[in-house]
Image (cartoon, rainbow, N blue to C red):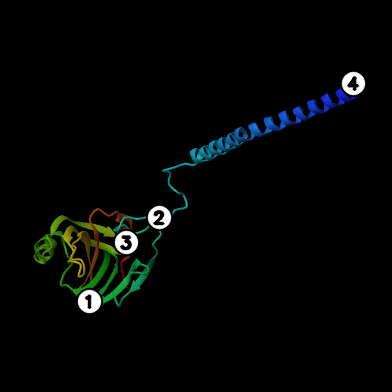
Amino acid sequence: MVKKLYLTAALLLGLVSVAACAGTQTALTPAASATSASTASTASATSAADTPTGEPDPNATESNPPGDIPDNTAFVPYRAKLYEIKVPEGWARTDISAGASFTDKLNSVTIELRPAASAPTVDTAKRNEAPKLQAAGGDFTLKKIETVDRKGGQAVRLVYQVDSTPNPVTGKVIRQEAERYEFYKNGQEAVLTLSGPAGSDNVDPWRLVSDSFRWL
């Protein structure tokens, strides 16, 4: 009888221990889940903090201001009967009565040939060319007239600003800066005009084009 009582007591004690262990395990499960979520959140925040913001992408495509000719532009020769000049590849060409004009967006290169009794000078440019350009309108503003040396020979250069003709769709007018070169040889004058939006950084492309002119 005593032996049976001992066995019963031992069995009850075992059942209580199992129940206690089960209860303890159930109580810990929510805490463990919270800790896991907190760890994941911390890892996510750390990852976001490690990601640089506001830095330039070295693989991004180069973006140029509207009037700037891209540095990777290729220049190809354009040849007429008496001269040759390099112009930006891919620009739209328009034939005019005495030459040709090449345009892209807001920039243009125009070359014209005309007879002339003598070589142009700074004085003749001041007396004749500047007044004609001013009479054409567009709030013409002369900045400089000088003689320059280029690979194709000496030329008279006029630097000025003028308003573009209004856009036929939007009516918008662009303030343009222009360089006009007058080359001369054997009774012929070649007039090269380069223009683009005022403030554009096209010093190097314009020098390349004006340096490329040569008589044939």
| Foreground disc of the pair 4, 3 | 4
- Of the 4 image quadrants, the one containing the C terminus is bottom left
Question: How far apart are the alpha carbons under marks 2 and 4?
Answer: 96 Å
Q: Position of residue 194 (x, y in %)?
A: 25, 63
Q: In the rendering, which numbered label is found on residue 98?
A: 1
**What residue is drawn where x is 47% and y is 52%?**
59
Residue position for label 3: 211
Residue position for label 4: 2
**What residue is drawn where x is 49% and y is 38%?**
49
Question: How far apart are the alpha carbons under marks 2 and 1?
Answer: 37 Å
| Foreground disc of the pair 2, 4 | 4
**Above or below, comparing residue 86 to residue 71 in the picture:** below
Q: Position of residue 168 (x, y in %)?
A: 20, 70
Residue position for label 2: 62
- Identify the amino acid type marked 1: Ala
As helix, strand or loop, the secondary structure at mark 2 comes to loop
Are discs 4 and 1 less than 8 Å apart at CB?
Answer: no
Q: Is residue 35 visible?
A: yes
